[in-house]
Amino acid sequence: MNGKNCIGGIILRSSKKILVMCSTVIIVVAIIILYRFLTHEKLSDYIVVNDGVVVTKQFSVKSQTAQQNTSAKGSIFVWGDKAMAKRMRIVTSFEIDPKDFGGMTIYIPKKWYIANILSSYPENQKTSLQPYASDRDMSSLGDDWRNQVEVGVTYVGNPAGGGTGTVIIDLVPDRKAILPSESFIIGVAVGSSTKGGVRSIGVDSIKIPISLDSGSKN
């Protein structure tokens, strides 16, 4: 009888240990599931339009050269805080005439650097030209700009063949050089002409002033 009681006691203690272990595992698993549920990023369509945007500008330019249909239009968005610009995006839709060797050029202001370029050009066109940002010395651009992005520009030879597309340029400032409420200029040039055997590129252009202390997004 004593032996049977001993065996029964051992079995009972073992069952209790197993029960405790199972309960512990269940509790731990439940805690993990609950934690993941509470901390998991919930999907939502709720957004704030133009969140952080302090300036928006629209622009449009068209080539005035006879029998040449090249144009560009778009928007500029500037993000910032307390009159300090943090980043900028230039969105441009354009059409380049098949006879135009000047294409489109977007001029990047001083103290700003190109972070990324997205482009749909050429859309269903037989041309290999892509948007091109120069990596050489651009001091010849003057005081307003430090770089340029060219689309469909051919300095020598025949035109690139024209086409339509959209280009998105993301810019970031030189934080060590840019000042609060500092103004800058975006330039957009299109078209070309030939006079007296001399080829000219970007014969029609506009300048878009950007100021963060204007108190308005437009």
Image (cartoon, grey):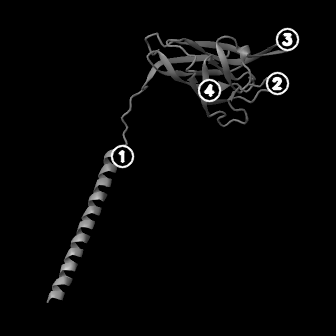
Q: To which residue does mark 3 refer?
A: 196
Quick one: 177 or 151, which is closer to the camera?
177
The numbered mark at residue 40 is 1
What is the C-alpha distance between the residues marked 4 and 3? 36 Å
Lower position in the chain sequence, tag 4 or tag 3:
4
Q: To which residue does mark 4 refer?
A: 114
Q: Secondary structure at mark 3?
A: loop
- Mark 3 residue crowding within 10 angstroms, few (<14) / some (14–19) / many (20+): few
Q: Is residue 79 left or right of residue 8?
A: right
13 in relation to 97, above or below: below
Amino acid, disc 4? Ile
Residue farthest to the left? 1
Name which residue lies at 83% across and 26% down: 157
Which part of the image, by quadrant, shows the N terminus?
A: bottom left
Amino acid, disc 3? Gly
Q: Is there CB contact under 8 Å for labels 3 and 2?
A: no
The percent coordinates of residue 79 (x first, y second) are 48, 22
Q: To which residue does mark 2 refer?
A: 156
The percent coordinates of residue 132 (x first, y second) are 69, 29
What is the C-alpha distance between the residues marked 3 and 1? 68 Å
Quick one: 204 or 45, which is closer to the camera?
45
